[in-house]
Image (cartoon, rainbow, N blue to C red):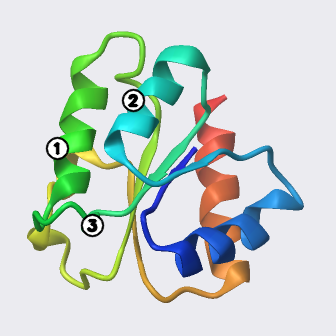
Amino acid sequence: MVLEDDEVNQELLGLYLSSNYTIKIVSTIEEALQSLADESFDLIISDIHLGNGTKNDGNEFLKMVRANPATENIPIVAYTAFNNPNDFNEEQFTHFISKPITKADFLEVIKKLLAGYH
């Protein structure tokens, strides 16, 4: 699942991932939480600065996922324009990817994370 509120980034990630993976793209924390309640996911890619006005919405989402026994172990990748991992809750994210990133580098990270999850 991808949690990203920017339509351009949604499209870009969709293009990167759709040829190799089944993906679901959501744009709000509420949609993401509902999707997690309805479906199972092997990986979550989450933006940090979502559009509802607070700087670290992705951190709040992360806390909710980690607090739920049904989802606490899903790898979560921070996909963000923040260049400094100290700007967000890095220790609870499985991995940090700084925007922009090439398709090859992005897919390599995803492949390694999914291989380690199964």
In the image, residue 87 above or below residue 33: below
Quarter of the image where one finds residue 84: bottom left
Q: At which x and y percent is residue 99?
A: 43, 84
Mark number displayed over residue 60: 1
Cα separation, mark 1 vs mark 2, equals 12 Å
Q: Going from the N terminus, do you reach mark 1 or mark 3 first?
A: 3
Label 2 SS:
helix
Determine whether the residue tagged by mark 3 lies in a helix, strand or loop.
Answer: loop
Foreground disc of the pair 1, 3? 3
Q: Position of residue 58 (x, y in %)?
A: 25, 54
Q: Nearer the viewer, residue 60 or 101?
A: 60
Amino acid type of the residue that numbered disc 2 sits on in the rendered structure: Leu
Circle 3 residue: 51
- Marks 1, 2: nearer the viewer: 2
Check the picture and name the quadrant holding the N terminus: top right
Left or right: residue 29 compared with residue 103: left
Type of amino acid at the residue the image marks with label 1 = Glu
117 or 6: nearer the viewer:
6
What number is the disc on residue 87?
Answer: none
82 lies left or right of 110 = left
- Please give the residue where the numbered disc 2 appears in the rendered image: 33
CA distance separating discs 2 and 3 = 16 Å
Placement of the C terminus among the 4 image quadrants: top right
